[in-house]
Image (cartoon, rainbow, N blue to C red):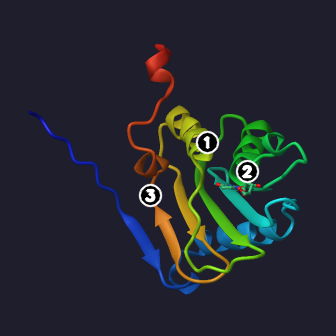
Amino acid sequence: MEKKRIVFDLLIFEDEGELSQNDRKLLSAAEAARKNAYAPYSRFKVGAAALLENGEMVIGNNQENASYPSGLCAERVAVFQAGARFPGIAIVSVAISAASEEHVTDVPAAPCGNCRQAIMEYEHKQQSPISILLKAEKGPIFKCNAMADILPLAFNSSFLGDS
Ligand code: THU
């Protein structure tokens, strides 16, 4: 029986000082965006910032709704905005800053499955990796080199016969 082992690199940085200048800037944009999140129901605020190949930066934050499923996560607000404002321009990286107003942790929250799938769509379309930076309110920064690393065996348009 053939066996395949899937591994990925999770880079862990103790603080912002260890990041590249671009990553530091992107993370601080995500942190600023988190402060403007509209999360009155969960009190869990998330900010995201996407850096595009043309140097533009696009931000998003979670937008909740009294009809809970009508809200949207920060990551999708950011990457959909990138797609709407800069169609055809590749996304290079996405930084995500998440923190609960009730429960303090220094473990970075990873994007939900729907957001991984949404970001994966762009990675597949542009045929280049999107790196992901994660940070809680305090503590280390986690970095993945590609969305495919944290969404292995992803579903994409090739299964629909479009590629
Ligand atoms: N949330 C995000 O914005 N991104 C994620 O990847 C996980 C969850 C938001 C959705 C909701 O507004 C709140 O966090 C609690 O789930």
Number of labels in the image equals: 3
Question: Can residue 108 be seen in the rendering of this structure?
Answer: yes
Q: Are marks 3 and 1 in contact (CB under 8 Å)?
A: no
Where is residue 120? Give x, y as percent: 54, 40
Q: CA distance from mark 2 to mark 1?
A: 9 Å
* Label 2 CA crowd tier, 10 Å (few <14, some 14–19, many 20+): many
Marker disc for residue 145: 3
Looking at the rendered structure, the secondary structure element under dot 1 is: helix
Q: Which residue carries the number 2 mark?
A: 73
Residue in view at x 56 percent, y 45 percent: 113
Q: CA distance from mark 3 to mark 1?
A: 19 Å
* Label 1 CA crowd tier, 10 Å (few <14, some 14–19, many 20+): few
Quarter of image, ligand 1: bottom right
* First of labels 3, 1 by sequence position: 1
Mark 3 Cβ and ligand 1 under 8 Å apart: no
Instruction: Tell me if residue 87 comes above or below residue 139 in the rendering.
Output: above
Mark 1 Cβ and ligand 1 under 8 Å apart: yes
Where is residue 45? Give x, y as percent: 77, 65
Mark 2 Cβ and ligand 1 under 8 Å apart: yes
Judge from the rendering whether residue 124 lies leftward or rightward of residue 39; answer left or right.
Answer: left
Please, what is the three-letter code of the amino acid marked with disc 2?
Answer: Cys
Where is residue 100? Give x, y as percent: 73, 72
* Front-most of residues 13 and 115: 115
* First of labels 2, 1 by sequence position: 2
Q: Which residue carries the number 1 mark?
A: 114
Q: CA distance from mark 2 to mark 3?
A: 21 Å
Please, what is the three-letter code of the amino acid marked with disc 1?
Answer: Asn
* Label 3 CA crowd tier, 10 Å (few <14, some 14–19, many 20+): some
